[in-house]
Amino acid sequence: MPLFVLVLAILCALMPGKAEAEPKLSRQIAVDAGRFDPEKTEFALINVGASDDEPWMVGGHLVLVARSDLGEYAFDWGIFDSDKPNFLLNYMRGILEYEHIVRPFGRFLRGIKSDHRAVTLRQLRLSTEQKKKVMAALVVWGKPENVTYAYDVVAKNCATVIRDVLFEALGANFREDLQQSAGMSARDAGRLAFGHAPLVYLLGEAAFGSRIDVLRSKWDLVYLPMTFPRMLQDLPAYDDSGARIPATKLLMEPQTVLEGESLDVSRQHWTLWCGIGLFVLIAILVAAKMRRTFRVLAVGGGVLFGVVSVVLILMWTATQHTMTHENFNLGFYWPVDILLVTFGIERFRRLSLGLAAAHLGVGLFFVLMWAVGVVRQDLGETAAFVLPLWAGVFYFSLRTPFKTCPV
């Protein structure tokens, strides 16, 4: 159960929603896309606001909308069906099959409106020839063999597919402009996007490994629907040859389509704040010599850390979720931490003392390796969250007679 909860909470955060497959509808509308009159068609990005109502709504959602002479349609690459056989097992292993569907825009909005989520439209400044190329890409996606695709949280999702469709239409300069550094890593972008969701933030900070701590380009970071417009906001429009058009913007001013819940996108550093709070609490318990209260905290922390370590090992070794591989947080979370349930029992005093000393030594070593650049994974917040508890265990094990600390 802990594995399910952790994986579901962390990875569902990047899922835009749940719906049943509609392959027939998808094929029918995609063929119609080839019949759109490009001179009477406009394409726009639709951002659906994040929500805390369901795990898969936490990261927001992105779709491409065509407003044409034949009607308005939402092209959506973010559909999964949890009723498929072995869905949960495949989901935890990182083997995900998503679906591309197309719905009348009004139907799409009715579904979103029932969730009370904000919807923002940003029209794309495209030429007639560029619209034809977008339409051609949509026709290809409407073929039966393309209705489903292998989903990847970073490389291929509802946002990156739209990015790739625009690349086909706009050319090499579009990609070149997005290859500029975003000045942040995927972890930074995640902290920004999920600052409104403390639980997802905390679990993500533990679960994601060193691969997401490299500074990324804007091209890479569009995988998060909530940061997609930010990555494109400074891009110019392009002419039919792909050249940049001076003093223009690819994205027009945002328009509110639906009022609703719109969670702030901000950097909150929940793990750091929890660590500071834990440090203050433990300092108070130490100063007041409140051994019984601290024992409850220590035992609970030991069980939590032990379970988390097992989950991290499984996510690294037994899944295809590459963002959870090479996780140096295992320098702070160990399976043997669960032995802290013996804390407060006199004959296990040396065990608690040794475990705390080992954790403090190894943890500080990893922090040092991170500080000098040997370890590229950002370990600061994890260290601030984990090490105060072990400092408290070390103090009470060293200075307090356990016979006065009843089990």
Image: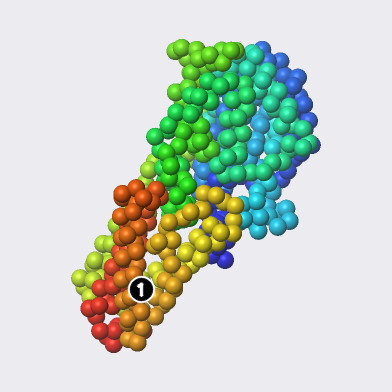
Tell me the colour scheme of the image: rainbow
Give x and y (percent) for residue 353. Answer: 31, 76
Location of the N terminus by quadrant is: bottom right
Please state which amino acid type lies under the numbered disc 1.
Leu
Residues packed near mark 1 inside 10 Å, few (<14), some (14 to 19) or many (20 plus): some
Foreground pick, 7 / 369: 369
Q: Residue at x 44, y 61 (%)?
A: 330
Q: Residue at x 32, y 82 (%)?
A: 349
User: Is residue 293 at least partly visible in the picture?
Assistant: no
Does residue 156 appear to the left or right of 101 in the view shown?
A: left
Count of numbered marks: 1
Q: Which residue is mark 1?
A: 355
Q: Quadrant of residue 70?
A: top right
Q: Is residue 131 visible?
A: yes
Residue 109, quarter of picture:
top right
Would you say 358 lies left or right of 181 here? left
In the depicted view, which residue is nearer to us: 246 or 48? 246
Which residue reaches farthest front?
374
x, y percent for residue 373: 34, 48
Q: Position of residue 29 (x, y in %)?
A: 75, 29
Q: Position of residue 337 (x, y in %)?
A: 42, 71
Above or below, 190 against 109 in this view is below
Q: Quadrant of residue 384?
A: bottom left
**At 25% across and 78% down in the image, what residue appears?**
398
| Quadrant placement of the C terminus | bottom left
At x 44% / y 28%, what residue is drawn? 180
User: Tag 1, which secondary structure?
Assistant: helix
| Residue furthest to the left | 287
